[in-house]
């Protein structure tokens, strides 16, 4: 069997197109421009790349994009003051504080100081609780992107066995909640799971989010299963020339693609969907803030 390749790049472009249509409608019919503020503390190189890309795509769909870059030694009080200012700014509908934060800042305190209605990351404890109890919430962007691709490929996910590898607050746990909401039978596997290959072999849906390059092997995959690879790992690639690198996922693509029914590549799979879902969440937050109907197909 040759797996269907789920093209996240193309899918994300479609999602951004739908977001742009909603932005136009909000502007033309209601005189409202959705606004997203991104806060970056320090100089983490990967975070700088993400933040630049977020700013560019926010502007491309016609939204207001605001960036706040703070020094690595910014005090907690100053960061909280900025968040308070953004919480109270009527032109800002979404706030994202880029993680990880420098060590001297209390990540939970910072996340929970964002107004939950503007928490487009879905990390605030009240959004986590709402998602866990099946209520309307802001949903974390990466799991939302994975869910959109799974729904698009399968239609209904009801009754399927799903194995999520990884238990992070950003991906693994919310992904499991979303799949449970779709009536999947969900297993969360992690670094201490016994007989991981056997656990994965039972899965109709595998979501790999462990941060270990090419860990999931082809002989772990049930024939015809759908494999969603959330990993983004940069490896040295001397075969491409000195100092060159290549991106790989948490899934050994070549061997898994031989058994899977469908699979997401890295790059070009989940990655582009994350930013598209951030934009979707910002439009959703803007509609909710203004008592308007939510955009269809852009929420969980
Ligand atoms: N760092 C890595 N992924 C994310 C994300 O989804 N949101 C935020 N705020 N920071 C991140």
Image (tube, rainbow, N blue to C red):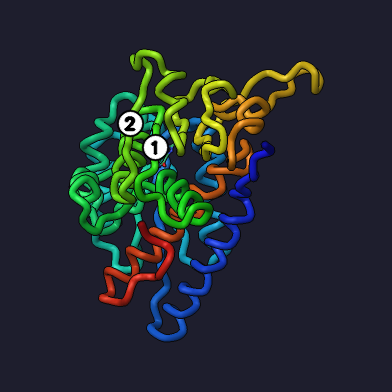
Residue 223, compared with residue 152, is above or below; it is: above
Density class for disc 2 (Cα within 10 Å; few <14, some 14-19, many ≥20) is some
Tell me if 243 is positioned left or right of 169 in this view. right
Tell me if 170 is positioned left or right of 269 in this view. left
- Whether label 1 lies within 8 Å of ligand 1 gets the answer no
Q: Residue at the location (37% across, 60% down)?
A: 299
Of the pair 81 and 195, the residue shown nearer to us: 195
* Place of residue 296 in the rendered image (x, y in percent of width and height, measured from the top left): 40, 69
Residue 120, compared with residue 202, is above or below; it is: below
Tell me if 216 is positioned left or right of 236 in this view. left
* Place of residue 154 in the rendered image (x, y in percent of width and height, measured from the top left): 49, 52
* Place of residue 95 in the rendered image (x, y in percent of width and height, measured from the top left): 35, 53
Q: Which quadrant of the render holds ligand 1?
A: top left
Q: Residue at the location (46% across, 34% down)?
A: 206
The N terminus appears in which quarter of the rendering?
top right
* Place of residue 186 in the rendered image (x, y in percent of width and height, measured from the top left): 32, 36
Say if residue 45 shows up in the picture: no
Residue hosting label 1:
162
Residue 22, compared with residue 239, is above or below; it is: below
The C terminus appears in which quarter of the rendering?
bottom left
Task: Report if the CB atoms under discs 2 and 1 are less than 8 Å apart.
Answer: yes
Of the pair 165 and 243, the residue shown nearer to us: 165
Residue hosting label 2:
187
Density class for disc 1 (Cα within 10 Å; few <14, some 14-19, many ≥20) is many
What is the secondary structure assignment of the residue under circle 2? strand
For the residues labelled 2 and 1, the Cα–Cα distance comes to: 6 Å
What is the secondary structure assignment of the residue under circle 1? strand
Q: Upstream in the sequence, badge 2 or badge 1?
A: 1
């Amino acid at each position: 069997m040759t797996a269907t390749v789920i093209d996240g790049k193309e899918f994300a472009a479609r999602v951004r197109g739908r977001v742009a249509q909603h932005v136009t409608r909000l502007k033309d019919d209601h005189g409202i421009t959705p606004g997203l503020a991104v806060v970056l503390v320090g100089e983490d190189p990967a975070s700088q790349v993400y933040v630049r890309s977020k700013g560019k795509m926010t502007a491309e769909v016609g939204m207001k994009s605001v960036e706040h870059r703070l020094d690595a030694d910014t005090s907690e009080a100053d960061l909280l003051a900025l968040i308070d200012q953004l919480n109270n700014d009527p032109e800002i509908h979404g706030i994202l504080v880029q993680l990880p934060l420098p060590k001297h800042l209390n990540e939970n305190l910072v996340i929970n100081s964002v107004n939950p209605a503007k928490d487009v990351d879905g990390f605030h404890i009240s959004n986590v609780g709402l998602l866990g109890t099946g209520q309307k919430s802001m949903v974390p962007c990466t799991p939302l992107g994975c869910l959109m691709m799974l729904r698009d490929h399968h239609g209904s996910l009801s009754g399927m066995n799903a194995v999520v590898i990884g238990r992070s607050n950003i991906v693994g746990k919310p992904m499991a909640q979303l799949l449970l909401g779709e009536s999947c039978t969900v297993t969360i596997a992690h670094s201490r799971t016994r007989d991981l290959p056997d656990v994965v072999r039972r899965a109709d849906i595998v979501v790999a989010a462990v941060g270990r390059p090419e860990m999931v092997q082809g002989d772990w995959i049930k024939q015809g299963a759908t494999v969603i690879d959330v990993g983004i790992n940069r490896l040295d690639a001397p075969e491409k020339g000195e100092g060159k690198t290549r991106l790989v996922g948490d899934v050994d693509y070549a061997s898994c693609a031989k058994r899977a029914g469908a699979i997401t590549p890295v790059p070009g799979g989940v990655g582009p969907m994350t930013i598209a879902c951030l934009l979707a969440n910002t439009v959703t937050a803007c509609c909710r803030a203004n008592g308007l109907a939510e955009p269809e197909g852009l929420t969980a």
